[in-house]
Amino acid sequence: MQFDDLIRSASAARKQAYAPYSGFAVGAAVQCKSGAVFVGSNIENISYGLTICAERIAVASAVAAGQREFVAIAVVADTSEPIVPCGACRQFLAEFAPKLIIVSATMRGGQKIESLSHLLPDPKRGILENVHTH
């Protein structure tokens, strides 16, 4: 599976990041099972705990548009090594796609592909597991 288009979408989204406190801009693009792609960029807040990661914004945008099934997500940052989603994002992603493919890329062309199930082997699951897919 090729992820070049998804990486390009995430890279473009990164340019919209609002990161005045850390200067650490991140872009994400999630590919839905339907083929639709939704993007997000991180949004910081002076009350740092209110900061929202790019991955969660991309997925929230997709969910708001009626999408519930996801195939892959690309995450792009200007780092020397590819970054992976934080723990909160991993759990958020697992709510919808525990076997999601994570494509981490740098602005310099570095790339790493992993599965969410590898990064979060035992996500928290509740009594409403998979209710969103019905």
Image: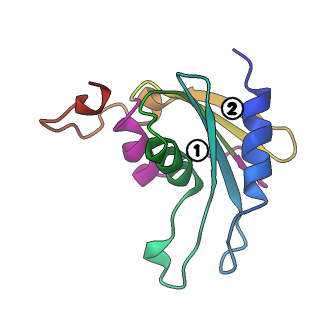
* Relative height, residue 109 to residue 78 (above, below): above
Q: Circles 1 and 2: CB distance less than 8 Å? A: yes
* Relative height, residue 27 to residue 24 (above, below): above
Q: Disc 1 to disc 2, how far (Cα)?
A: 9 Å
Residue 44 visible in this rendered orientation of the protein: yes
Q: Nearer the viewer, residue 91 or 31?
A: 31
As drawn, the residue found furthest toward the left would be: 127
Residue 110 position, x and y percent, is 80, 37
Residue 120 picture quarter: top left
Q: Which residue is mark 1?
A: 84
Q: Nearer the viewer, residue 72 or 36?
A: 36
Residue 119 position, x and y percent, is 46, 35
As drawn, the residue found furthest toward the right would be: 108
Tell whether 17 sits left or right of 131: right
Q: Residue at x 39, y 46 (%)?
A: 92
Classify the position of the C terminus by image quarter: top left
Q: What is the secondary structure assignment of the residue under circle 1?
A: loop
Q: Is residue 90 magenta?
A: yes
Residue range (magenta): 76-97
Q: Residues within 10 Å of mark 1 (few under 14, many from 20)?
A: many
Q: Residue at x 79, y 59 (%)?
A: 15
Tell whether 25 sits left or right of 61: right
The amino acid type, in three-letter code, at marker 1 is Val
Residue 80 visible in this rendered orientation of the protein: no
Q: Residue at x 44, y 43 (%)?
A: 63
* Relative height, residue 106 to residue 125 (above, below): below
Q: Which residue is mark 2?
A: 112
